[in-house]
Image (spheres, helix red, strand yellow):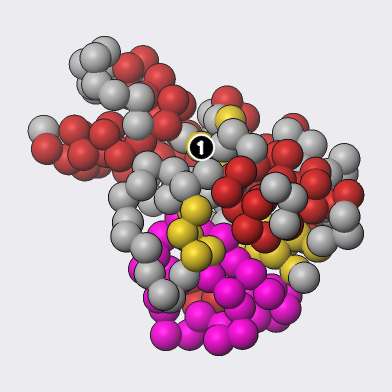
């Protein structure tokens, strides 16, 4: 078994960090829920789309190390390593933000993996993490890695026509936004993913 894992919003949770940065910049009211989607939707509603785009560069770049892993994600990786299940991180990520400072987003992501011990103590090596510039490259990488399963937070990505036909799709849906589907296994937590994929009840 080789399990592929998306990076942004699947392994890494940005809800509190987006809220924190938006508050620091005076862009949102303090009582707005601490949720990335709430921050994005609020800024779009008040016509601050450019601020949202630039904030993404800050969060995914200079401030990335402040983001936490989703509860249970690091434990899943540790268990997978312990029982000999291979894991690959496969993400679609531009090299630099669309607006704002030209942070190296790939370097920031690799730095996060090292800071949170995903690389090294959890069994992953640097060459097990792939940050692809296009969605097509991400799809091709999943196939090239021989992933038997792939975990992603976007059902539209799992529904891509070029998604490898031999890879089982796992939708990570912590906010319970999507319905069950015969096309994918929907899990609302990393504990559920662990139970489903690693058979450790």
155 vs 162, nearest the viewer? 155
Q: Position of residue 86 (x, y in %)?
A: 81, 62
Q: Position of residue 26 (x, y in %)?
A: 26, 16
Q: Position of residue 19 (x, y in %)?
A: 36, 24
The stretch drawn in magenta includes residue 165: yes
For residue 34, side relative to residue 105 (left or right): left
In the image, what residue occupies the spot 47% across and 70% down? 184
Residue that label 1 marks: 13
In the image, what residue occupies the spot 67% across and 60% down? 197
Q: Position of residue 134 (x, y in %)?
A: 50, 70
184 vs 151, nearest the viewer? 184
Residue found farthest to the left: 46
In the image, what residue occupies the spot 24% across and 21% down? 32
Q: Which quarter of the figure is the N terminus placed in?
A: bottom right
In the image, what residue occupies the spot 63% across and 58% down? 196
Residue found farthest to the front: 201
The stretch drawn in magenta includes residue 11: no
Label 1: element kind: strand
- Residue 198, quarter of the rendered image: bottom right
Position of residue 157 relative to residue 54, above or below, is: below
Which region shows up in magenta? Answer: 141-169
Position of residue 105 relative to residue 72, above or below, is: below
For residue 88, side relative to residue 49 (left or right): right
Asked whether residue 178 appears in the rendered view, the answer is yes
Asked whether residue 102 appears in the rendered view, the answer is no
99 vs 167, nearest the viewer? 167
For residue 148, side relative to residue 175 (left or right): right
For residue 140, side relative to residue 74 (left or right): left
> Neighbour class for label 1 at 10 Å: few (<14), some, many (≥20)?
some
């Amino acid at each position: 078994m080789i399990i592929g894992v998306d990076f942004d919003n699947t392994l890494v949770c940005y809800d509190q960090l987006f809220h924190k940065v938006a508050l620091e910049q005076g862009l949102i009211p303090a009582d707005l829920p601490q949720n990335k989607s709430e921050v994005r939707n609020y800024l779009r509603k008040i016509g601050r789309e450019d601020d949202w785009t630039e904030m993404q560069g800050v969060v995914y770049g200079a401030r990335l190390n402040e983001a936490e892993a989703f509860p249970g994600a690091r434990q899943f990786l540790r268990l997978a390593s312990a029982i000999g299940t291979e894991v690959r991180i496969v993400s679609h990520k531009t090299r630099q933000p669309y607006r704002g400072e030209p942070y190296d987003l790939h370097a920031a992501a690799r730095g996060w993996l090292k800071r949170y011990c995903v690389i090294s103590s959890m069994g992953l090596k640097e060459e097990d993490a792939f940050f692809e510039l296009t969605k097509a490259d991400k799809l091709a990488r999943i196939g090239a890695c021989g992933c038997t399963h792939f975990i992603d937070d976007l059902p539209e990505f799992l529904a891509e026509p070029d998604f490898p036909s031999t890879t089982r799709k796992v939708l990570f849906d912590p906010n319970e936004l999507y319905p069950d589907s015969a096309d994918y296994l929907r899990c609302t937590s990393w504990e559920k993913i662990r139970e489903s994929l690693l058979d450790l009840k």
